[in-house]
Image: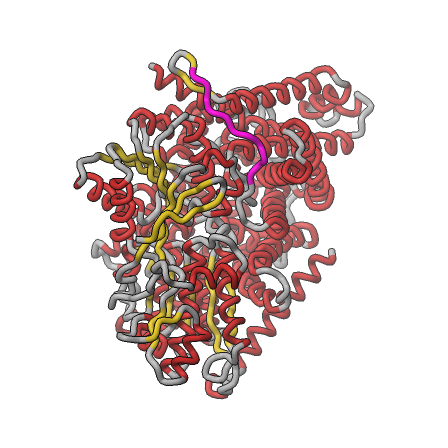
Amino acid sequence: MTIVAQAILNGIMTGMLIAIPALGLTAIFAVLRYVNFAIGAYATVGAFAAWYVNTRFGLGVFPAALVAFVAGGVVGLIAEQTALARLRPSGALAVAIASIAVNLILENVIRFIFGNDLQGFDLPIARDWRFAGLRFGPQQLQTATLAIVIMAVVFLFLRFTRFGKAMRAVADNPDLGRLFGMDPARIAMITVVLGAGLAGVGGVLLGLDTAIDPMTGSRLLLSIFAAAVLGGLGSIPGAVLGAVMIGVGEELAVLVLPATYRSAVGFATILLILSLRPAGILGERNT
Amino acid sequence: MLSYLIFTLTLGGIYALLALSLNLIWGGVGMVNLGLAGFFAVGAYASALVALAGVPLPIAMLLACLIGAAAGLLATFATIRLRGDYLAIVTLGFAEVVRMVALNERWLTRGSDGVSGIPAPFRAELGVDGFNLLYLALVSVIVLGVFLTLRRLDLSPFGRVLKAIREDQELATFAGKSVTRFKMQTFALSAAIAGLAGALYGHFQTYISPDHFQPLITIYIFLAVTAGGVGRPVGALAGAYLVVFFLEATRFLGELFTVLEPGQVAAIREVLVGLALLCVLHLRPQGILPERIAPAPKPETSV
Amino acid sequence: MSSFTFSRRGFMGGVAGLAATGLVPHTVMAQDSPIKIGALTPLTGSGGPYGPVMVKAIKAVAGEVNKAGGVLGRQIEIISEDDQTNPEAGVRAARKLVDVDRVSAILGTWASSVTTAVAPICWESGTLLATVSGADAITALPHQGYIIRTQPTTILQGRKFGEFAVEQGVKKLFFFSPQTPFAESQFSNITKAVKAAGGETKSLIYDDKKPSYRSEVDEMLAYGPDVIVLGGYATDTAVLLKDIFRSGYEGKKIAFAYSVNQKLIDSVPAEIVEGIFTIAPSPAESSSAYKRLVSLIDVQNPDPYTTQVYDQVNLVIMAIAKAGAADGKSIRDAIRSVSQAEGGAVVDNAVEGLKLIAAGKPVNYQGASGPCDFTASGDISDSQFRYEQVNGGKLKLLKIA
């Protein structure tokens, strides 16, 4: 029983790591209606930006995460304005494919600048705590707290700010945005900054737990997608729920399956859920 | 040099089959298959393994098509009714699962060692150069055959139904067409072509491994189809050869940037692939050889 | 859109390059044109952390030899291609090296799949292939002598890991590895050595793309080992080591030196790598090649792949001098007469070796990765290993044996 409880605990922790970039992906989808494959690269950009200020200027986790948000957001906005926005008339798939190209380009720009070597944050590491036969780490707790705070901020932002309301309105119906007196183009831009910025923060959380290299984000792209799709593309709470489910599912699977098949579990879960609920768990029913 | 050209053309032919496969499903019914590498792998493994078990090559390749089609049906069975975005992600996941099975199921696929010594037709009799020429001819004839078939299909009533589905699924349903059946048939056919490409690759190279089937090749094929013009088989064909030549030509960049580290030159090459894809999408979204009847423009925020 | 013109220019340049090389008939190549040697390494993809420094070492040796006058009166030109850690891309790169550049040897192939895919091109075209790949199956290919491998076989390597664990008093050994072509063989050879000393073993193969391995580590804890062997590469090992540290595991850890290399040690907090033992093929303590390599490329603690390509390029250059010809077949036939000549003068670099060869003396190369003596099938026949331990963020040499 302890084993299962431990696996669930581990899964929630892993889920938190995926949840933030999945939030970014789903926010962009909600408003702009395309699947952004560059989310992986935005996460890597954020991780490298945070790593740079951490190792160069000794910034701690929270300020570094803020830098990552800004770096991810700015790079995301530039990519959107130069490479993606103008393709929107050609349809969501054209934009999605262009975002694959953006992902490839950004990954290699990072490789060009920083090389392929592993880089690690200059932060202490602590042993896990043990409690009732379960173990969990102070760092995991910190990461989870940070993730929960970010999610809370995003929810509050969407629920209570004028922009947040406009954004949700646009997500439901593009024309509604105008009722809020907001230019849809501006809403799109702010959404991209928010989404790409969240991916950047996700990259940092990932980097804290691992070591970073130019493929940090791309390596997790499939898990991020699985989380967002499982919860329902475009649904903010869905992304979090999906991420936790994928995390827990993978860890539980390790108990019965060879550990090498972990990634396949995410895929199998999506197939199962999608055949029951074609728009994901919390996705919209129509279209 | 000549052998390099022959090799590049043969590979171009195999890429062309993949591009035709993608064009059929993407240009045909507007579904995106990001798992192309997976179907490529299924065909390659199927044909290689049964050929090593003693099955004659033509039958092995036919089997590769059938198993590819079956894999296509399997991958789309649960997702065919979903929106395009979901299908894109599910197919991407499918390719990853195929790679994992190839990596871990040693009893079947020989795991990470890969399958070597795959029979190559008449290789012993013809020698290396003769074989390469023969294989170029074989691949080219198959590409031509698939191309002609698809072009006929494109212009046939079946092809018109597909385009109708792509443009307006609801209208097509309204017109009494079983959209799901058409989509599944098309996807199966597309997967079969990708499987055939895989089989041809395996018997050409005599060695395949899980590492062969990483997602990058799918990006190359998307570049090929976009560059050539989505929706027209001849565009896919031209695009595929162009991409192979583009990939090879970028090698010579290193000679222009001698001050850079080798890792940086490699990064520039991949950036160029990405930039090329973006440039085509922006500057010539209809491709070099666009469809004769342009697809209907899409509203800005449509799904 | 300047980027577009840029790529187009690259394309045109490439086409021109293709044409130009094609127009030069093989026979017209003058005797004083450079000797071309290919470096085919992973510069992108999962092998990316290893390739760039390998190319650096290869180029450094060529530069050193060129400065001393080259070989056979000709300069050496290193042509570097990226295999993208992908055999499909690797084959395309190898075809270009063999068919267009007409290199006489290809050095440095890393992933076993890339090596296996490229090997037929090499033996059919008469090009020497020197590899660092670990899969046992590689030297069993029908390569007619065109493959040499500087990486010790897993039989040798696994045994050394097992024996070292026994020296550390192992009772229960746990083996962590991603799915590599040598994982299974490595584990069975470790097991053989540990069982012989009355211990027991267990293995876990993990997915190398994950951001955390907590449940895998739990499985390890449940087994309760006193020694862990890590069989992965740097990227996944870094993640795994953090989770092992957090779990509170206090036992011993043994890893490949290419995995827990200086780069990894520098990129993670010091306490998670403290005390890890690393094992790498090595020359005898008296050999100076390793020290020469360190000063040549200015990299402290170069990892085993770098030491191996250093040896590969030195051997190939000396074999060319010995044979008096720069084609792949001559290199193949001559390479063992410079790597292991009976009674030959011991040398640790090609510059010195070339002088001795010019003077008609036999040489016996002792490299930075080991004595570099090859069996008929292309494997190294025996090697000592260097055992190092991470101590205060640096690798400290324990012993060479």
Relative to the observer, which residue lies in front, C174 or A224? Answer: C174
Instruction: Return the x and y of residue B99 as percentages of the image width and height.
Output: 39, 44
Residue toward you, A121 or B216: A121
Residue C398 shows up from this direction: yes
Query: Compared with residue C334, is residue B297 higher up or lower down, i.e. above or below?
Result: above
State whether residue C149 is above or below residue A284. below
At x 34%, y 66%, the residue is C120
The x, y position of residue B136, in whole percent, is 41, 68
The answer to if B10 sits in the magenta stretch is no
Residue located farthest toward the front when viewing the structure as drawn: C286
Residue B31 in view here: no
The boundaries of the magenta stretch are: A120-130
Residue at 40% from the left image edge and 49% from the top image edge: C397
Residue A169 vertical position relative to residue B284 in the rendered view, above or below: above
Residue closest to the eye, B137 or A137:
A137
Q: Is residue A154 left or right of residue C357?
A: right
- Residue A248, percent across and down? 44, 23
Q: Work out which quarter of the rendered image holds the C terminus of chain A and state it.
A: top right
Secondary structure mostly seen in the magenta stretch: loop
Occupied quadrant, residue A94: top right
Number of residue marks: 0
Query: Is A123 inside the magenta-drawn segment?
Result: yes
